[in-house]
Amino acid sequence: MAPTTPWSTTPIAVDDPTVVTGQRGTAYSCPDLVTLDGHLAALCTRIRQATPQFPSLVQAFRDDVDLLLDRRRWLELTSV
């Protein structure tokens, strides 16, 4: 089955250059900064909800945040 975004069940093309794949296989569609910031906000909420009961999930979410921040920096540099 093709990956989906956290907010949608619509499959995303795996070879799409605007998609960031998280550590656990979650696909985040990041065509622009607004969408990417929405993913970051959602992950921050999930981190707060998972702490401290699920430390492995917290770490996975933080790893995804790191990947998304890398993509955010790339988008900032290429949109100038």
Image (tube, rainbow, N blue to C red):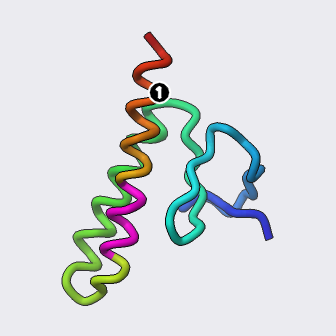
What is the span of residues highlighted in magenta in the rendered image? 58-65
x and y percent of residue 16 in the render?
Answer: 72, 42
Neighbourhood count class around disc 1 (C-alpha, 10 Å): few under 14, some 14–19, many 20 upward: some
- Secondary structure, magenta segment, majority class: helix
- The answer to whether residue 11 is above or below residue 35 is below
- Quadrant location of the N terminus? bottom right
Residue 59 magenta-drawn?
yes
- Quadrant for residue 51, please give it: bottom left
- Identify the residue shown where x is 38% and y is 62%: 63
Q: Amino acid at mark 1?
A: Leu
User: Which residue lies most toward the top here?
Assistant: 80
Out of 33 and 58, give the one closest to the viewer.
58
- Identify the residue shown where x is 28% and y is 79%: 50
User: Which residue lies most toward the bottom here?
Assistant: 53
- Identify the residue shown where x is 51% and y is 30%: 32
- Identify the residue shown where x is 49% and y is 18%: 78
Q: Secondary structure at mark 1?
A: helix
- The answer to whether residue 11 is above or below residue 75 is below
x and y percent of residue 57 in the render?
Answer: 37, 78
Out of 37 and 70, give the one closest to the viewer.
70
- The answer to whether residue 34 is above or below residue 49 is above
- Quadrant location of the C terminus? top left
Residue to which mark 1 is pinned: 75
x and y percent of residue 6 in the render?
Answer: 54, 61
Q: In the figure, is residue 20 to the left or right of 46?
A: right
User: Which residue lies most toward the left here?
Assistant: 52
Q: In the figure, is residue 47 to the left or right of 60?
A: left
Residue 80 magenta-drawn?
no
